[in-house]
Image: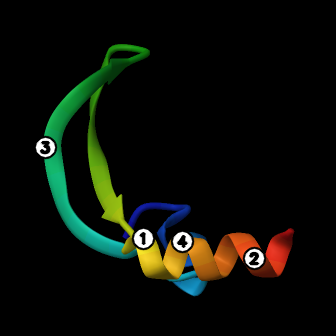
Amino acid sequence: MHQNAGVYEKVGFTAEGVRRQVQLREGTWRDELVMSILSQKWNALSERTG
């Protein structure tokens, strides 16, 4: 799992998939985790955090 995925999942995001080797950083290709959240969950989260 990617290092921040757990934090996103705690607030309602869902892991949708992984894009393989899409970022070249410091000479190493890295994967990218694709996360999503439904608008209803996003709106509820926004209301709680004000």
| Frontmost residue, 6 versus 47 | 47
Name the side, left or right, on which 15 lies relative to 43. Answer: left
| Frontmost residue, 44 versus 15 | 44
The mark nearer the N terminus, 2 or 3, is 3
Badge 1 amino acid? Ser
Rounded to the nearest whole Å, what is the CA distance between mark 1 and mark 2?
A: 12 Å
What x and y, as percent, mark residue 35?
Answer: 34, 62
The mark nearer the N terminus, 3 or 1, is 3
SS under mark 3: strand
Coloration mode: rainbow
Q: Quadrant of residue 15?
A: bottom left
Rounded to the nearest whole Å, what is the CA distance between mark 3 and mark 4?
A: 27 Å
Which dot, 3 or 4, sits closer to the camera?
4
The mark nearer the N terminus, 4 or 2, is 4
Classify 41 as above or below 26.
below
Name the side, left or right, on which 2 lies relative to 32. Answer: right
SS under mark 2: helix
Q: How many marks?
A: 4
Q: Specify the label residue 20 is tagged with.
A: 3
Rounded to the nearest whole Å, what is the CA distance between mark 4 and mark 2?
A: 9 Å
Q: Which residue is mark 4?
A: 42
Q: Which residue is mark 1?
A: 39
Q: Which residue is mark 2?
A: 47
Residue positioned 43% across, 15% down in the render: 26
**How would you rate the neighbour count of disc 4 (Cα within 10 Å): few for under 14, some for 14-19, many for 20 or more?**
some
What x and y, as percent, mark residue 25?
Answer: 40, 19
Residue positioned 15% across, 46% down in the render: 19
